[in-house]
């Protein structure tokens, strides 16, 4: 057999083997990219992940402490005895509006946050609301009702204004990110998840066969007031395509375009901001 012919066959086989190896490595990398390494803490790289991904990771072990509230819908705390009723439906969960048109929400940040970066991220997240809405978070003095920010088991909040100090949990190991701070504070202001909207079935399909057992309630619909705004895939309140998946297959599928980007927000969207302004009747409504 001619030496040139033999050399040609050898090169072809070598390229084929390398191609299969590269393809396998690429596939494994794709699978790895679907998860965040559970050993990582609040690193700079984590800021690139969406709020829903960070919250899901931080809340993996939520619910094991008896001294913490019942948490449903992924990160919404509820008062036992009122699990089936959204407090906002009784028009009692909005924070009051002052005579100057602003909505002032007192807050306390726990001394658990000892690192300067942690307090800076939380306070920065609080102040983002003042930049584009009439909501003003300010340090509590002696106000009865206030947001009590603590590092408890995970990331969660009650929906709307509650009585006295209401906990917003931002665990130091996973929840101290701008998007998560905004997400939980939007709950405290009265907003539910985007994929829980009463009209969500016209915009997303929930693939129940892919949901982790016991996590089905995270996908329940809520009788929401949508404030005349369209469904927003880019909302910081929209969970990701693979939220609570048991098999790395989608649990939330956008429709009719299954390939639409969904649940990747790293900060409030323009629609999130518009809804705050409409709910609280801010001057800059539109």
Image: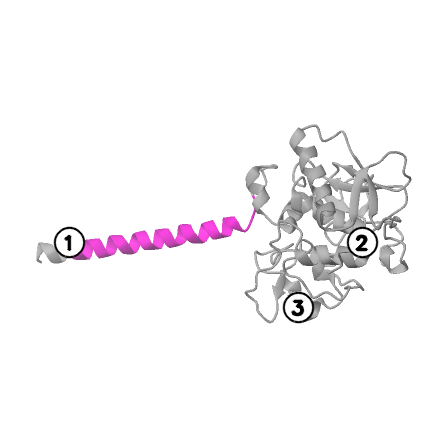
Q: Residue at x 77, y 32 (%)?
A: 110
Residues in magenta, as a range? 7-36
In reply to whether residue 95 is colored magenta, the answer given is no
Q: Residue at x 66, y 62 (%)?
A: 232
Mark 2: secondary structure? loop
Q: As rendered, which of 255 and 236 lies closer to the eye?
A: 236
Query: In the image, 257: left or right of 8?
Result: right
Q: Which residue is mark 3?
A: 203
Label 2 – label 3 distance at C-alpha: 22 Å
- Residue 7 circle label: 1
Q: As rendered, which of 69 and 278 lies closer to the eye?
A: 278
Residue 195 higher or lower than 130, as above or below: below
Spot occupied by residue 115 in the image (x, y as percentages of width and height): 67, 29
Mark 3: secondary structure? loop
- Residue 190 circle label: 2
- Say if mark 1 contacts mark 3, CB within 8 Å: no
Instruction: Assess disc 2: are there few (<14), some (14-19) or many (≥20) residues with their C-alpha within 10 Å of its C-alpha.
Output: many
Task: Say which label, 2 or 3, has the lower sequence index.
Answer: 2
* Residue 35 in view (yes/no): yes
Spot occupied by residue 207 in the image (x, y as percentages of width and height): 64, 64
- Residue 71 circle label: none
Task: Say which label, 1 or 2, has the lower sequence index.
Answer: 1
Label 1 – label 3 distance at C-alpha: 57 Å
Spot occupied by residue 198 in the image (x, y as percentages of width and height): 76, 66
* Mark 1 or 2: the one toward you: 2
Task: Say which label, 1 or 3, has the lower sequence index.
Answer: 1
Mark 1: secondary structure? helix
Q: How many marks?
A: 3
* Mark 1 or 3: the one toward you: 3
Spot occupied by residue 268 in the image (x, y as percentages of width and height): 67, 52
Quadrant into which the C terminus falls:
bottom right
Residue 33 higher or lower than 224, as above or below: above
């Amino acid at each position: 057999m001619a030496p040139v012919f033999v050399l040609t066959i050898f090169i072809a086989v070598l390229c084929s083997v390398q191609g299969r190896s590269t393809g396998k490595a690429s596939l494994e990398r794709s699978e790895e990219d679907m998860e965040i390494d559970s050993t990582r803490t609040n690193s700079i790289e984590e800021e690139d992940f969406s709020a829903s991904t960070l919250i899901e990771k931080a809340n993996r072990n939520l619910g094991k402490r008896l001294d913490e509230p019942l948490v449903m819908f992924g990160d919404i705390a509820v008062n036992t005895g009122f699990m089936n009723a959204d407090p906002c439906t009784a028009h009692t969960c909005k924070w009051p509006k002052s005579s100057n048109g602003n909505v002032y929400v007192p807050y306390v940040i726990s001394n658990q946050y000892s690192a300067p970066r942690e307090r800076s991220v939380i306070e920065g997240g609080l102040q983002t609301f003042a930049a584009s809405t009439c909501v003003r978070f300010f340090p509590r003095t002696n106000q009865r009702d206030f947001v009590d920010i603590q590092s408890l088991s995970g990331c969660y909040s009650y929906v709307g204004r509650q009585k006295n100090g209401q906990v917003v949990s931002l665990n130091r190991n996973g929840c101290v990110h701008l998007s998560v701070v905004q997400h939980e504070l939007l709950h405290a202001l009265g907003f539910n998840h985007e994929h829980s909207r009463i009209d969500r079935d016209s915009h997303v399909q929930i693939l129940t066969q892919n949901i982790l057992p016991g996590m089905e309630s995270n996908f329940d619909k809520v009788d929401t007031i949508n404030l005349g705004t369209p469904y927003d895939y880019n909302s910081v309140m929209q969970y990701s395509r693979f939220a609570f998946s048991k098999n790395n297959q989608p649990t939330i599928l956008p429709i009719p375009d299954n390939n639409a980007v969904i649940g990747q927000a790293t900060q409030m969207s323009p629609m999130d901001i518009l809804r705050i302004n409409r709910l609280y009747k801010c001057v800059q409504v539109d």
